[in-house]
Image (cartoon, grey):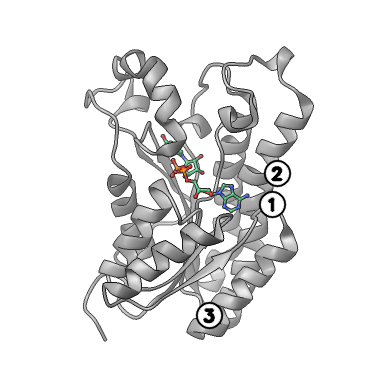
Amino acid sequence: MSAGLLAGKAALITGAASGIGRATALAFAREGARVAVADLSADRAGEVAAGLRAGGAEAIALAVDVADDAAVAQMVRATVAAFGQLDCAFNNAGIATAAVGAGGVKIADIDPAAWRRILEINLDGVWYCLRHEVAQMRRQGGGAIVNTASIGGLVGLPASSAYGASKHGVVGLTRVAALDHGGEGIRVNAVCPGYVETPMTVEALGRRGSDILRRVPLARHAQPEEIAEAVVFLCSDRASFVTGAAWTVDGGYTAV
Ligand code: NAD
């Protein structure tokens, strides 16, 4: 068995074909985990998994839309079929307001369909993942789950009502899941990134990156690898007494 913080663990990551999810897939593999790389984009998930295998890790690619409960159930089944168990899950797939054409739109003006789509992916999707992962983890006697929230799940960000509601929902869901399943050996935490340089934020950081930086004590945006390191820790046995937490990795944005 390889050495590392996640040696021998079977892991599942959603939204793993890009940005924070992809960086975490690489970090998990480096730490000795077997990794199921799940994403809406089967092609890009396949490329990430192939890269992990080329580096000597065990990895599979899975196509999933996290807004589809049946597809999420199948994703968890496929992971367990491949690896025999599910020790770590990172429920990370999500979309920004701009992805549904609602970037910069205030509450009274948001299109109901855009609102629904963001909630379906960012909040319903995390619940679907949680319920199928927890079902597997309680059968095997435990596990660790991390959900991707955001600083937008802790404080209000302007013109992001659906995104903010979805991410506050993820923090709440994380806390309740920790209460409900702690007695079954299942830890559930959230990671709350600040602004990270990924394909999701290219447009927003290009438009108002310098305004945002004025609010970041570390005076820079994050790289996805910096979020991945927090997720590795939270999924590892080193975090054995950490559950129900909403961990900020935000360069101090919410410390003001
Ligand atoms: P990204 O766009 O680089 O990656 C997101 C991935 O999720 C993509 O590969 C995409 O195909 C996948 N995805 C989208 N919808 C999906 C669906 N319905 N089912 C399955 N996969 C789907 O974005 P990122 O910046 O890496 O964001 C990852 C997570 O981090 C999101 O939940 C996002 O809200 C959160 N987040 C990002 C930032 C940031 O600044 N980038 C900050 C805080 C939180």
- Residue type at numbered disc 1: Ala
Viewer-nearest of labels 1 and 3? 1
Q: Looking at the picture, which amino acid does disc 3 mark?
A: Gly
**Real-space Cα separation, disc 1 to disc 2, in angstroms:** 5 Å
Circle 3 SS class? loop
- Counting residues from the start of the chain, the first of labels 1 and 2 encountered is 1
120 to 159, vertically: above or below: below
- Circle 2 or circle 3, nearest the eye: 2
Which residue appears at 33% of the width and 69% of the height? 52
Residue 124 appearing in the image: yes
Count of residue discs = 3
Q: Amino acid at mark 2?
A: Glu
**30, above or below 81, in the image:** above
Q: Residue at x 26, y 68 (%)?
A: 30
Q: Nearer the viewer, residue 71 or 226?
A: 71
- Distance from Cα at disc 1 to Cα at disc 3: 27 Å
Label 2 lies in ligand 1 vicinity (Cβ under 8 Å): yes
The verdict on label 1 being within 8 Å of ligand 1 is yes
Q: What residue is disc 1 on?
A: 67
Give whichever of 103, 31 is nearer the camera. 103
Residue at point 33%, 45% (across, down)? 224
In what quadrant of the picture does the N terminus appear? bottom left
Whichever of callouts 1 and 3 sits on the residue coming sooner in the sequence is 1
Relative horizontal placement of residue 29, taking residue 148 as reference (left or right): left
Give the percent coordinates (x, y) of residue 65. 65, 56
**Label 3, residues with CA under 10 Å away: few <14, some 14-19, many ≥20:** few
Name which quarter of the figure residue 72 lies in.
Answer: bottom right
The residue that label 3 is drawn on is 141
Alpha-carbon neighbours of circle 1 within 10 Å: few (<14), some, or many (≥20)?
many
Q: Is residue 59 left or right of residue 55?
A: right
Q: Which residue is mark 2?
A: 120
Whether residue 89 appears in this view of the structure is: no
